[in-house]
Image (spheres, rainbow, N blue to C red):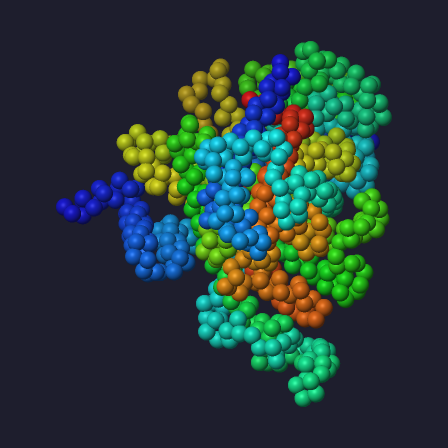
Amino acid sequence: MKKAGLRGYIIKRLIYAAIITWGVVTITFVLLRVGPMSPADKYLSNMSARTQDPAQVVAAIEARYGLDKPIYEQYFDYVVNLARGDWGWSFSNSLPVVTLIRRHWVYSFQLILLSMLFSATLGILIGVFSAVKRYTRTDYLATLFSFIGISIPNFWLGIMLILIFSVQLGWFKSYYDTGLPMFSLANLKALVLPVITLGTGMMAGYTRYARSATLDNLKQDFVRTARAKGLPERVVIGKHVLRNAILPIITIIMFDLSGIVFGGAYLTEIIFGIPGLGRVSFNALFASDYPVVVTITLIGAMVVLLTNLATDIVYTRLDPRIRYD
Amino acid sequence: MNHNLLEVKNLKTYFFTRNGVVQAVDGVNLALRKGENLCLVGESGCGKTATALSILRLIDSPPGKILGGEILFHDEDLLRCPEERLRQIRGREIAMIFQDPQSSLNPVFTVGDQIAEPLKLHLKLNSKEALERARELMEQVGIPQADERMKDYPHQFSGGMKQRVMIAAALSCDPEILIADEPTTALDTTIKAQILDIFHDLKQARNMSILFITHDMGTVAGIADRIVVMYGGKIAEVGTTFDIFDQPAHPYTQGLLTCLPNISAQQQRLTPIPGTIPSLIDPPSGCIFHPRCPKRMPICDQEDPPEVFISDEHRVVCQLYKQPVTSPGKTGDTHSAQ
Amino acid sequence: MTEKKSGQISDRFGGRRNLVFFSGLLALVAVILLDIYLEAQILEPMGYFYIFFALVATCYALYPLYVNRRLTRYYWERTRRHRLSVLGLAFIIFLIAVALIGPLLTPDPTKVNFDKKNTPPVGFTIQQSVFDTKTDQLVSRETPGTWQHPLGTDEKGRDMLAMLVSGARVSLQVGLLATLMAIFIGALMGVMSAYLGGWWDNALMRFTDVMMTFPFFLLLVFIIFIFGPSLAFIILAIGLTGWTGTARLVRSETLSLRTREFVMASKSLGASGARIIFRHLMPNVISSIIVIATLSIPGIILAEAALSFIGLGDPTVTSWGVVLNAGQRSLDTAWWVAVEPGIMLFLTVLAFNFLGDGIRDAFDPRSQQ
């Protein structure tokens, strides 16, 4: 009964995810067509130097990419090609977009993963500690720091870190070295400043959420029950409170992906020259390389969708109160 | 020393809120004897719960603070013993049950785990033994299909069943004292009767000492051996159940009893006590009950009322009884003027 | 007689201020159409934004605040308890004053003067190589900060103070206008969704979900990439993408209100749909809207700054992001160019966060202890 409910729930969530995916793809298509420049113009603005008659080139490109077909056929092709994994050709890199993505995603991935680990661990620890020590000087200090962390623009923080630790002190390189092997200490060191840049804002956010979630749960009667059983305070907090507080924190962390994390990673990659997807998209912007920009935007949306889906499903395991209907 | 298992002496617990200092418990003396059921009665907000929580130092701090007094358990002062020692007592020797079983159980752990938790902690049982013991306990408190239900989560239980789970968890280490803070208030009347039966059996079968806190005189009548009536953070009257119901001395106690519907007496209507419970931030001078007291005398708002022994077991704090009664031998309980 | 009639008309719209609002809106649309038709440039695009949001703000924020003066004072008292939020408000007022008056007092922020390049702020002195016209050689010379450029100049000799003042204007414009727009769309979506229910609710909420699935900044970059950067368009883009959170919040608040007695009561009295929405539902969610508005301003200011920083900002305006971008390139020669706009940005965002936090606590009945 319960199992069947769970399966039904997951199927429902998958169908829902498919609908959202369709919506996301459609919106990008509409935006591309509504825009003042047709994709062909975008190509053209990039290739104009090499051509004689722009009108001819436009016609050629439109024929090549099917832009002369009726709009519904174009839409159909667009969706089908995306689904088949044919994401177009990046002319500024002279590569299929798929290859480009395959080559660069790992840099974004390691940056985001490390930043999330760093910020979630530290943020939750400080937040819980701050809640336990509520209304003391430690708590006020933590709150103030979290305010500062939330308010500090991460791209400025990155520049300041470079200014202090690279330009003035010379401890780190100001530019990410792509030659380093992925799993090496040197690579980890190269990522210190970027991770702090991206992670500080997230950490501050998690500190606040962790604090308020912990405070909410500390007020609950079951905390008193746990104390009345004679449990030491570290078990009361670490087991009874944290197990309840962690659920909303996880939601927030997952939700943050679409907001702070992706925007932040984009900027961080640009500042430190990390060749991740943000940097690739940024370069493509100025080369008018639109298939790359479209694909990376779509990938961002898909990652958000999948993490939300995963969170919802993991939640059914973590929170016994959730019902699947 | 004596037959008092737990003695509370001159306990003061204040809450320091933004609006002022709430004198929730102000100089309370009481004693719990071995194997008796002592009921602590009073309107809500009179300091009963604060008293109970103070015994195990479970007052939330801030804003609450225990400012003074002694709580003697086996001649050991719980207010001054180290936290470490107190934790050994909590759940092991003195267990507690709370008012709202809904929120008092942790929603994300199975009830079996929650009952087994003190067993693992205090008796050092391993998981399997503890869960086996938890199942027995659930059967003892009348939860059907215990071996199945112990894997369920609190939200899958009804209110009465949750309170049974709470009781099972409290009983798990076979404590000497059980403090029950309004355990039946949140329950339906029929369920309430079943839970009270459990308490009755507990006392019979285990000879356990119970401090039972309630605002409901009807509940008290059925289970109490002795009764402590509290009003406004202070004790108004202490006596055996017979004393309190048959010869209530304090006007407040009398008021509480007239609130009870009585089938046998030819009573036309229930008389509520006029007025509301006073603010404990800025309590009335003299006797705290005087603004609502039907037998008020001029002296009542001038002087703190004296404690008077009507009999060995029956004492009252009221000006009405201020006669040169020689108190029989016992001293130290006198309510000193502040 | 006429009084009564106008009362009836305004009642159909759910109150007089809605009538005022809709007539204002109609007039504005008329002017825009006229503008397009005549190609007359009656107003700059930004002008329409200002008028529209002045209308919204007057009808739905200032007017209710004025009518419920006692409530306003009560909330103000509660907000004031947070010392930091008062500090934040003070800074915001200061910034608004700077943005309004500042440009009159400072030099042109776009004026280039290579003789004065890389002047440090007052109190600092740096060594830099300068082209000496007498000897036709690069010589290393001490450059002290001067009061002529109290915050220094950048690599092109533009006055930092002037650029920061100009940036304050841009940031506030974007922050306030885009937020108002996003909140307006979000609130409308949320209330409609909750009120219409059924199929409409489903469609609107799925659309919201789709918009929420896009990472905010990536979508913004994508839109600006397609449509090209201009300040008015950036504001529009932020407004059109940033409404999702508000829509969800307002929907859930409205749903919980819809079943309350007073809405039921007015429904049973035969009140029209519009009247219920504007008269009964909107005012009751307004406190949550104010809170979410204040709290979303910082993110929106940061989004604009980030766009300008990566070079997708309006090339014709000097915003903090643009200055910061220039500063990043001259970190080893002129650190202040990167430091100063960042500090301004940081303080502005901090101020709005402090204020938003205070307001949220003031509106939250649970926060009273």
| Percent of width and height locating residue B109 | 70, 26
How far from the left and from the top, in percent, is residue B244?
60, 25
C317 relative to A140, above or below: below
| B67 or A220, nearer to the observer | A220
Res. A97 in view: yes
Residue at x 30%, y 47% (from the top left corner): C22
Observer able to see residue B35: no
Toward which corner of the image does residue B52 lie, by quadrant?
top right
Q: Name the residue furthest left.
A: C1
Q: Position of residue C343 (x, y in %)?
A: 62, 63
The residue closer to the viewer here, C116 or A284, is A284
Above or below — where is C106 with respect to B251?
Answer: below
Q: Residue at x 51, y 67 (%)?
A: C166
Q: Is A121 above or below relative to B248?
A: below
Say whether residue C294 is left or right of residue B53.
left
Q: Quadrant of the C terminus of chain A?
A: top right
**Residue C279 picture quarter:** top left
Image coordinates for residue C132, horizontal then vertical, percent: 68, 84
Return the residue found at the far top. B145
Q: Nearer the viewer, residue C303 or A125?
A: C303
In the foreground, B46 or C262: C262
Rendering quarter of residue B332: top right
At 65% from the left and 75% from the top, the residue drawn is C118
Q: Residue at x 44, y 38 (%)?
A: C190
Which quadrant of the rendered structure holds the N terminus of chain A? top right
Q: Is residue C21 left or right of residue A77?
A: left
